[in-house]
Every structure is written in structure tokens, then in C-alpha cells.
């Protein structure tokens, strides 16, 4: 059980209830909100995402949430982006003609080079760890997670990569820099390993709350 409150960013483009239930299952207090005051008062933020990158960024801006998220992340609050939410952490995406992202991590998002394998990439896939992080405590190497995506991030700095997966070609599936974390898969749909990852994130938030 953690004492942390994790705010799930409610911008209409993620399976918020599933994420909420998963966080509660690992002992965190989860709050679904788009109110700036709620987001700023939380001990951690989780940005889910399902859909297209340009539409997601447009919605965040229309809701006046972009600056709130940037302020929280730059202020040191633990920040986790999952699936398309991970992609939004980067500077830009080529999806649907291109769009700029939050820019918390350097790099761009591009279509997965699947070498002829069916896209979107849907299903269970292994993640191999390339460096240590508190986010990965207790997770076996490799671990298995549930993926649904066509695009993947290309970090400019390989030091930001925690985990790598392969679907026709290798891609960064878990990233981290300081207090900012991202996973290309859906941890809330990834059974034991996904819950372990969320538990570790909640513990990071708990340290901030203490």
C-alpha cells in the first residue's frame, strides 16, 4: 500500500477506468481529472493514450493542459506516459502529417518498421532491459507486456532507453529520464508484469509524497 495520489490525465483519449483500477489494485490512490489544481496537487501523473498523436496534442492544448503537464514534470513530479501517452513525451511525431509533442524527451515518433509484419502491432511481446531503474525493480528480464500500436519513439539519447522490444525491428518500449517515464505497451492490460511496473511507479510517487 502506498500513500501516493496519482492523477490520471482525463483528456478523452485513454482507457482511464482500466488504469484507475490497476493503480488501485497495487495500492495507490488514483484520481481521474483534467482540473489543473488536481493535477498540480498530485504526487504523480499518469498520461494514458489511445488514438492518434496529433489529435491527442490538439486536445491537450484545447483543454489548456499542456503547460500544466510541463510544469508538473519540470518541477520534479513523477510522470508516466503509457502507450500513445509515451509517444506524447517526445518532441514530434510523423503520424497523420506530423505534430509537435510535449518535448519532455528528445526524439521523434515514427511508423514501426515491421519488415512486412502486420500493423498495428497487437499482442504480447517481450521487453528486454538494457539498464537498471527503480521502475523495473523485481521484474524479470525479459518481461512480457501487451502492445497495441503502429508508431514507436526514436529517442535521440540512447541513455533514455530502459527496455527494447522487437517486432520486425527493434524499438524502444520503455524510456526514462529523471522523473519522466514511458512505456509503449499497456501496463494495465499486462497482467503480473504490468501491475509490477505500476506498483514501482506508485512507490516512486510515494517517495515524493513522504
Image (cartoon, rainbow, N blue to C red):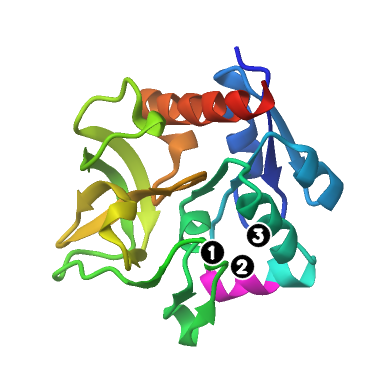
Q: Does the magenta stretch include residue 57?
A: yes
Which mark, by number, is residue 131? none
Q: Are marks 1 and 2 in contact (CB under 8 Å)?
A: yes
What is the magenta range? Answer: 51-58
Tell me which label, 3 or 2, sits earlier in the chain: 2
Q: Are marks 3 and 2 in contact (CB under 8 Å)?
A: no
Secondary structure mainly formed by the magenta segment:
helix
Estimate the spatial distance between the alpha carbons at disc 1 and disc 3, rounded to whole Å.
21 Å
Which mark, by number, is residue 51? 1
**Quadrant of residue 50 in the image?**
bottom right
Residue farthest along the top direction in this orientation: 1
Residue at left offset 34%, top offset 53%: 160
- Residue 191 versus residue 59: which sits nearer the camera? 59
Query: x, y percentage for residue 72?
Result: 68, 50
Residue at left offset 49%, top offset 24%: 199
Location of mark 3 (residue):
70
Q: How crowded is mark 1: few (under 14 residues within 10 Å), some or many (20 or more)?
A: some
Query: x, y percentage for residue 209?
Result: 68, 26
Task: Tell us which disc is closer to us: 3 or 2.
Answer: 3
Location of mark 2 (residue):
56
Q: Is residue 46 above or below residue 141?
A: below
- Residue 113 versus residue 207: which sits nearer the camera? 207
Quarter in which the N terminus is drawn: top right
Q: In this view, does 69 lie above or below 150?
A: above
Amino acid at each position: 500500500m502506498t500513500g501516493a495520489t496519482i492523477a490520471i490525465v482525463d483528456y478523452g483519449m485513454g482507457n482511464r477506468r482500466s488504469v484507475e483500477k490497476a493503480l488501485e489494485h497495487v495500492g495507490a490512490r488514483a484520481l481521474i481529472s483534467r482540473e489543473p489544481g488536481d493535477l498540480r496537487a498530485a504526487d504523480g501523473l499518469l498520461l494514458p493514450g489511445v488514438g492518434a498523436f496529433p489529435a491527442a496534442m490538439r486536445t491537450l492544448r484545447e483543454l489548456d493542459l499542456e503547460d500544466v503537464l510541463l510544469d508538473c514534470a519540470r518541477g520534479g513530479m513523477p510522470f508516466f506516459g503509457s502507450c500513445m501517452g509515451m509517444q506524447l513525451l517526445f518532441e514530434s511525431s510523423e503520424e497523420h502529417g506530423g505534430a509537435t509533442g510535449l518535448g519532455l524527451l528528445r526524439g521523434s515518433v515514427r511508423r514501426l518498421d515491421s519488415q512486412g509484419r502486420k500493423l498495428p502491432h497487437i499482442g504480447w511481446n517481450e521487453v528486454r532491459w538494457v539498464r537498471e531503474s527503480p521502475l523495473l525493480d523485481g521484474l524479470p528480464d525479459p518481461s512480457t507486456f501487451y502492445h497495441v500500436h503502429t508508431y514507436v519513439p526514436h529517442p535521440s539519447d540512447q541513455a533514455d532507453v530502459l527496455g527494447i522490444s522487437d517486432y520486425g525491428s527493434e524499438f524502444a518500449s520503455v524510456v526514462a529520464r529523471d522523473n519522466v517515464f514511458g512505456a509503449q505497451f499497456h501496463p494495465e492490460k499486462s497482467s503480473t508484469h504490468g501491475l509490477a511496473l505500476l506498483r514501482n511507479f506508485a512507490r516512486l510517487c510515494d517517495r515524493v509524497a513522504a
